[in-house]
Amino acid sequence: MTNTAPTIDDGHTVPGAGDLAARALAVSKVYGSGDARVTALGEVSIGIPRGRFTAIMGPSGSGKSTLMHCMAGLDSIDAGQVFIGDVELNRLDDKRLTRLRRDRVGFIFQAFNLVPTLTALENITLPMDIAGRKADKAWLDRVIDTVGLRPRLGHRPSQLSGGQQQRVACARALASRPEIIFADEPTGNLDSRSGAEVLGFLRDSVREMGRTIVMVTHDPAAAAYADEVVFLGDGRIVDTMAAPTAEKVLERMKGFDLPGVGSA
């Protein structure tokens, strides 16, 4: 069977990555210069399988958020290549990169980033409304039911708990059926119960809805919801773990003897 590589206008494409939603090849990222020079990523290569929940784990300063931002097209790279599907982000101008992020990538951040004057439903559909796209009602209903928001759709953010607001943010990321969702510390502002609920919804979106999620976290309990954990230290991948548990993740992190292990 021949696979046809997707393109973004005249964006450069590379064949042979049909099973990967995103990948980075020998990516390096440096901040500052001279004595202030810091290598945030040093020739990192990683592939994100479709339909899987991948956690990127590491202490503060390990490069995990930088890696996510570079793979999502939110930050530039100094060397290497980054792909969403078969589209190389490095070759896209700002307009095409913005279009790719809008049409093919979802984002969930620690901050909920909801519009306070809009209802939960209006916040969920806002990106599609701005893009002039009509929501797929059947898919939207499935997303709303998966995250358990139906009784709260008419509520504004001030009428919702922190956990409920993050569920709105999750639904907003899922509503446009993106190829991949990047989540940066999505439970960082939540209590343990609300955080567990949100992580459960993310896991369900992968197992029941076929989504692909990359989550950055420093929390072993959060990483345990993933199918695989990728460990970063000092800007490099130092290990991976399949079928993680919180206990195994914490033990593995301690074994790296990296600063910040086990901290909140």
Image (cartoon, helix red, strand yellow):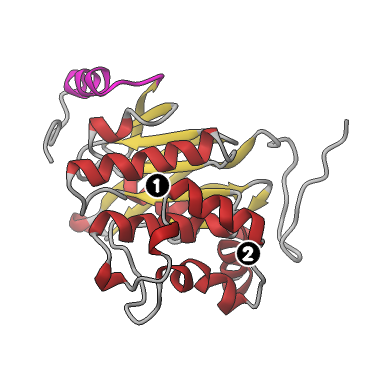
Prevailing SS of the magenta stretch: helix
| Residue at 31 percent of width and 44 percent of height | 63
| Residue at 45 percent of width and 58 percent of height | 150
Q: Which label's residue is closer to the chain start, 2 or 1? A: 1
Residue 191 placement (x, y as % from top left):
17, 47
The answer to whether residue 231 of the structure is visible from this angle is: yes
Residue 228 placement (x, y as % from top left):
43, 26
Find out whether residue 92 is within the magenta segment.
Answer: no
Magenta stretch in the rendered image = 242-256
Quadrant of the frame with the C terminus: top left
The kind of secondary structure element at disc 2 is loop
The kind of secondary structure element at disc 1 is helix
Residue 243 placement (x, y as % from top left):
40, 19
Other residues around mark 1 within 10 Å, as few (<14) / some (14–19) / many (≥20)? many
* Near-viewer residue (214 or 78): 214
Q: From what the image shows, is residue 131 above or below residue 100? A: below
The answer to whether residue 26 of the structure is visible from this angle is: no
**Residue linked to disc 1:** 67
Q: Is residue 240 left or right of residue 134?
A: left
Q: Quadrant of residue 20?
A: top right
* Near-viewer residue (156 or 129): 156
Q: Is residue 104 left or right of residue 262?
A: right
| Residue at 88 percent of width and 30 percent of height | 1
Q: Amino acid at mark 1?
A: Leu
**Residue linked to disc 2:** 92
Residue 105 placement (x, y as % from top left):
55, 56
| Residue at 38 percent of width and 35 percent of height | 55
